[in-house]
Amino acid sequence: MKGNLLVAHGGGPTPVINASLQGVIQEARRYSEIDKVIGARFGIEGLLAEEFVDLGVQPEGFVQRLSFTPGSVLGSCRRKLTAEDYPVILDILRRHGIQYFLYNGGNDSMDTCSRIARLAGDEIRVIGIPKTIDNDLAVTDHCPGFGSAARYVAVSARELATEVASLPIHVVVMEVMGRNAGWLAASAMLAGSDGGRGPRMIHLPESPFSQEEFLTDVEALWSREKGFLIVASEGLKDTKGQSLADTGILDGFGHTIPGGVAQLLADTIIRELGIKCRAEKPGLLGRASLALQSPTDREEAYQVGARAVSAAVDGETGKMVSLRRVSTAPYRIDLELVALDRVANIEKKFPQEWINDRGNDIRENFKDYCEPLIGEPLPEFAGF
Amino acid sequence: MKGNLLVAHGGGPTPVINASLQGVIQEARRYSEIDKVIGARFGIEGLLAEEFVDLGVQPEGFVQRLSFTPGSVLGSCRRKLTAEDYPVILDILRRHGIQYFLYNGGNDSMDTCSRIARLAGDEIRVIGIPKTIDNDLAVTDHCPGFGSAARYVAVSARELATEVASLPIHVVVMEVMGRNAGWLAASAMLAGSDGGRGPRMIHLPESPFSQEEFLTDVEALWSREKGFLIVASEGLKDTKGQSLADTGILDGFGHTIPGGVAQLLADTIIRELGIKCRAEKPGLLGRASLALQSPTDREEAYQVGARAVSAAVDGETGKMVSLRRVSTAPYRIDLELVALDRVANIEKKFPQEWINDRGNDIRENFKDYCEPLIGEPLPEFAGF
């Protein structure tokens, strides 16, 4: 089966989504079955608009730089397709001689990918490449993108906790991305491991948030120590399941965009306890920082991209490349293929057994899971 | 004149304040005139409480790690001294055999330092070591700490601008520290130089902010390009000189602590223009990030610390170590000593001639000043 390969990105970028693209481009060169490697600009929207770019004719250095370029170099979108869009897409793929279609995205994108695969049948092979900093994809041990974003959170938490302890005049609340799943916020616990300084509390969307308990905890901590860090997931929910802070804006999939939870908690601490408090919200910087990219994550992102190509050439379709953890120490993963239907639209929440009883911190055994993914040890600082 | 050396930190830390401490400790070893090198914990407060630590007896690796440790390893404070405090300080310095007192801080701290120097007369030699990420100290070409924080802002602005352009569904406003001086926010202009992607607008406290003009500009930009970055200094002021966003909290010196300007601008864009907008506020991360430390800044911070020691031993007092730019290309600086009174309490604002006529961007000639300070070229990304 000889023809062109089309690759597209869906949803929010990760620090290593372009590393997966690098894997696709370089692996595709190995197969005579693949003619051109084409990229759709801005995801499914670019596909529908037939905005394509020939990835085989880019200037010197383009492919080499991909693994160190933030954002999605192809461009991405958050468009939910309607039933009428699918036959149009199939027609476009046919007209451009696409035999292989690779879609790099999260659980919403894997649903899109799955529907295209079903419609394409045996005619076009469709493979999903996983990515999300949120780490909420089903089946796969973890998602490319998470390790780097987790490294950003862990390093930032250690730096902030160290900074705020050195000028101990206020509490600092750091907001971490993650709409419904607390994986990223949880990774801040690594900051406090191995004798390092980390946050004194970590709140996840999976733990119903009680303002009363929170204020009790802050007051108790402040009585022992001025200048400490609290980490809060942007998607915190109250005991009734309502988001604490919402922008009121919906994304293309109808999900509410959260925002401002750290400032809300800081304002509450100031108002109710009279304790000075700052809110920090690195936001999108947490998925755009190249300096804190995880080398392990970058390499895995490359491998899942490359594997999507070889799987498609080998005759697979309707599958997503998944990471299986073979062992944790030493850390080793295998790549496998799983049916897209097992992944589409499912959100993998942070496991309750890794959350402490009070719901305000992460248990030590999450470290075994998370630490290999951030790729390098956290920096150690001087201190007394 | 033989005796102990005492070093203390005042005000907010920088990414390289501990590199200056490293310079102090290592330089002091060269002089038989210096007996012990003692650090005051938490600045002047620790001095008054006689909370001292012997910096000569720290464990293996302590001194080596200093230049890569965020926060102030000694600890700092924001206490404004009263007239009664000064004789107490002098008495404490005498009792601990201090012949050399080095105070590492910004313009508030240089005032404290100057008063101690005057009181100490010929008895104790007092030297100021400059630091501030805000770069608002008088006389010196720039301040240790600024180069690293500027590198953080410039790299972050390029990463954010690249990220938001790749999923072009909203405007992003990034808030940058700087109460009254816009040096740090201005350094975001480096992101857009040399063909890189940078912010489309930069707003400083030195340019009175007009909401009407701002909204006109955002609308015009949005009509041409979805997904762009705006950089706003935390200390933005309206045309009447009032801060746009204040926490209402005063620091130890009675200065209002600003906060939330990016969220305020984002809310305004959403409400008035119906354009989706996110606010990001890395906040203290901008002065705690070691990964984006400027090597030039780190080296200069070390040198000003070392020079403070040699100046004191050589008989100087009542002076601050200052950086004089000998040439920009190639970049070369000299160290010199300036009277503390020329620096104390003065805020060096960002020059008007580097701000464009509209007051919403930085002129190209600021690049010559700023670029050498960030130490390394900005990363170049792949793109079409």
Image: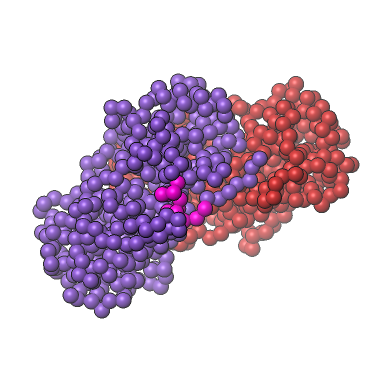
Chain colours: A red, B purple
Tell me which residue sits at (46%, 41%) in the image.
B364
The picture places residue A268, in percent across and down from the top left corner, at 35, 35
Q: How many marks?
A: 0
Q: Is residue A27 left or right of residue A374?
A: right
Tell me which residue sits at (42%, 44%) in the image.
B366
Residue B373 is a magenta residue: yes
The magenta stretch spans which residues?
B367-377
Tell me which residue sits at (23%, 52%) in the image.
B343
| Magenta span main SS | helix
Asked if residue A196 is positioned above or below residue A268 in the image, the reply reads below
Front in this rendered view, residue A156 or B27: B27
The quarter of the picture where the C terminus of chain A appears is bottom left
Q: Is residue A74 left or right of residue A367?
A: right
Tell me which residue sits at (34%, 53%) in the image.
B141
Front in this rendered view, residue A383 or A138: A383
Residue B264 is a magenta residue: no
The picture places residue A376, in percent across and down from the top left corner, at 56, 59
The reply to whether residue A266 is in sight is no
The reply to whether residue A41 is in sight is yes
The picture places residue B16, in percent across and down from the top left corner, at 38, 58
The picture places residue B363, in percent across and down from the top left corner, at 43, 39
Q: Is residue B63 left or right of residue A355?
A: left
Q: Is residue A343 left or right of residue A270?
A: right
Front in this rendered view, residue A203 or B289: B289
Front in this rendered view, residue B321 or A73: B321
Outermost residue, right direction? A1
Outermost residue, bottom direction? B32
